[in-house]
Structures are given as structure tokens and as C-alpha cells.
Image (cartoon, rainbow, N blue to C red):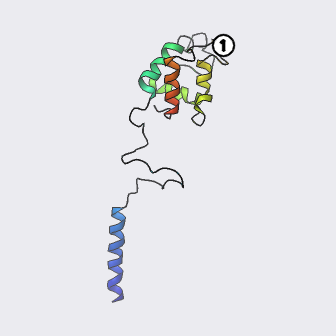
Amino acid sequence: MRFRVLPLCLVGALGLAACADFQRGAPPAAGEPEPAAGDDGGPGPGATVFAGAVHDTLLQGCQSCHAAGQAASNTAWLLTGDVEADYLATLPFIDESAPLQSRLLAKASGRGHAGGGVFPADSAELDLLIQWIVDGAMP
């Protein structure tokens, strides 16, 4: 009898393992909300992303100085016009834990920026940058 139970237990264990969702990862920590169904960690509906309006805004407002051979070409932040390269170059200037304290926003509004304010405090451009950072600074 003992030898018949072991194969049945193995079949049952394999059946449970086949149904397991190994892609889900660790459960959320206590107090964290469960991810929404279908949430893959990407931007949610309506989230502001870098490619498109954010990149275009930075190119229009900043690339005239922050590009190779331009007035600010010796700074830590240069825009190339390539979305992926510019996104990666911009990330060090983002503080997702304190979005409004991000260096990108300080510079864009003129705080600590040799070029002065690029976007006025109440501008749609600065609001867009703030929203992008608040939404998680997604590519």
C-alpha cells in the first residue's frame, strides 16, 4: 500500500506545480496593494512616458545648449535626439522618491541653471515633466 501512495503523491505534486504561476514573483509586502489584473509593471493607461511629448519638450527647450558642440556641451547632461540615449541620460536627474525635488525640474525652472529658467513655473512644459516623473519616469 505504501508504494502506491508515493506515486499518487508525486502525480499530485507535479499537477500542482504545473498550475503554479511562477511569473508572478513575490507577494506584495504587508500594506502594499495587490497589482491589478494584467498589470505587467509598465505604464498604466494615460501615464506620461518619455518617448513622445516629454522627449520633444526637452529637445525643444534644452537641446540648443545641451548637445555636443553647444554652450552646455561640457555638462553632465547632453541630448542627442535619440529617444533611448536621451532617456538614459536624463534618468540620473530624476528623483522618483521626491519628484518635485528632481534636479531636472530644478534646472528647467532656473534653479542652479546657468542658462536661467527654461520653462516658467506655471507652464504646460514644466507640468508635463512633473507628471512624467510622478507617473514613474517611464521610457
Element under disc 1: loop
How many discs appear? Answer: 1
Q: Residue at x 61, y 10 (%)?
A: 71
**Between 67 and 43, the one nearer to me in the picture:** 43
The x, y position of residue 121, in whole percent, is 57, 17
Depicted 30 relative to depicted 73: above or below: below
The x, y position of residue 77, in whole percent, is 58, 21
Image check: 14 left or right of 81?
left
Residue at the extreme bottom: 1
Q: Is residue 76 visible?
A: no
Query: Where is the C terminus found, in terms of image quarters?
Result: top left
Q: Which of the 4 image quadrants contains residue 69?
A: top right
**Between 5 and 130, the one nearer to me in the picture:** 130
**Between 110 and 14, the one nearer to me in the picture:** 110
Q: Amino acid at mark 1?
A: Ala
Q: Is residue 57 visible?
A: yes
Answer few, some or many: residues within 10 Å of disc 1's Cα (few below 14, many 20 plus, some between 14 and 19). few
Q: Residue at x 41, y 23 (%)?
A: 52
Depicted 38 relative to depicted 1: above or below: above
According to the picture, the residue beneath numbered tag 1 turns out to be 114
Q: Residue at x 49, y 29 (%)?
A: 132
Q: Which of the 4 image quadrants contains residue 7?
A: bottom left
**Between 108 and 21, the one nearer to me in the picture:** 108
Depicted 18 relative to depicted 2: above or below: above
The x, y position of residue 59, in whole percent, is 49, 16
Depicted 132 relative to depicted 31: above or below: above
Image check: 2 left or right of 50?
left
The x, y position of residue 114, in whole percent, is 66, 13
Image check: 11 left or right of 79?
left
Query: Where is the N terminus found, in terms of image quarters?
Result: bottom left
